[in-house]
Image: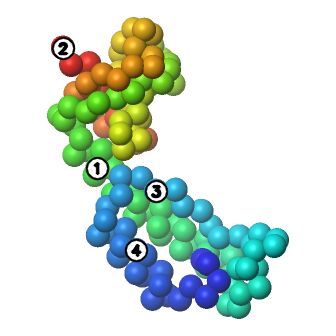
Amino acid sequence: GFPGETLDDFEQTMSLLKEVRYANIFSFRYSTRPGTAALAMPDHLSEPEKEARLASVLALQREITAQYYRDQVGHVVEVLFEGQSRKGGKLAGRTRGNTVVNVEGASSLIGTVAKVRITRDARNSLHGELCA
């Protein structure tokens, strides 16, 4: 919903997401910021239109991310362990691609990198087991 964004611009964004298939994106509804050039630009979209476009982007990305996570099951990835998981009794870490992976393991793994076999996908993370 950036000022001046046309329907064609938006459709090109959606096409790009479908083509590139990012594992995750960070996307927000455009809002004006004092002191920025965009504030003075013409053709600001209505709030409902910005919300609708963002909802479409997020819905598409949820599908892409879910497929990406499903595709990771069975693969071995390197994980940098950062701390305790919100999933009780597990450790949480991140892949090189910034995907959260939850694994059962000793707290001594925190701060280290280890190979993990992905065993299942979840909505916002992956689950795995340490490789021997």
Q: Secondary structure at mark 2?
A: loop
Q: Residues within 10 Å of mark 4 (few under 14, many from 20)?
A: some
Q: Is residue 31 left or right of residue 92?
A: right
Residue under the image location 52 percent in, 56 percent down: 26
Residue 65 to residue 87: above or below: below
- The residue singled out by tag 3 in the image is 25
- Callout 2 touching callout 4 (CB < 8 Å): no
- Callout 1 touching callout 2 (CB < 8 Å): no
Q: Position of residue 37 (x, y in %)?
A: 73, 79
**Residue 55 or residue 23, whichever sits in front:** 23
Q: Is residue 112 left or right of residue 54?
A: left
Q: Quadrant of residue 116?
A: top left
**Residue that protrudes farthest toward the right in the picture:** 34
Asked if residue 19 shows in the view, the reply is: yes
Q: Amino acid at mark 1?
A: Tyr
In 3D space, how far apart are the residues under numbered discs 3 and 1 (Cα atoms)?
13 Å
- Callout 2 touching callout 3 (CB < 8 Å): no
Q: Secondary structure at mark 3?
A: loop
**Residue 34 or residue 71, whichever sits in front:** 34
Residue under the image location 77 percent in, 85 percent down: 40
Q: Which comes sooner in the sequence, label 2 or label 4?
A: 4
* Quarter of the rendering occupied by the N terminus: bottom right
Q: Residues within 10 Å of mark 1 (few under 14, many from 20)?
A: some
- The residue singled out by tag 4 in the image is 14
- The residue singled out by tag 2 in the image is 132
Asked if residue 102 shows in the view, the reply is: no
- The residue singled out by tag 1 in the image is 68
- Of marks 2 and 4, the one in the foreground: 2
Q: Position of residue 71 (x, y in %)?
A: 22, 46
Q: Secondary structure at mark 1?
A: helix
In 3D space, how far apart are the residues under numbered discs 2 and 3 (Cα atoms)?
33 Å
Q: Amino acid at mark 4?
A: Met
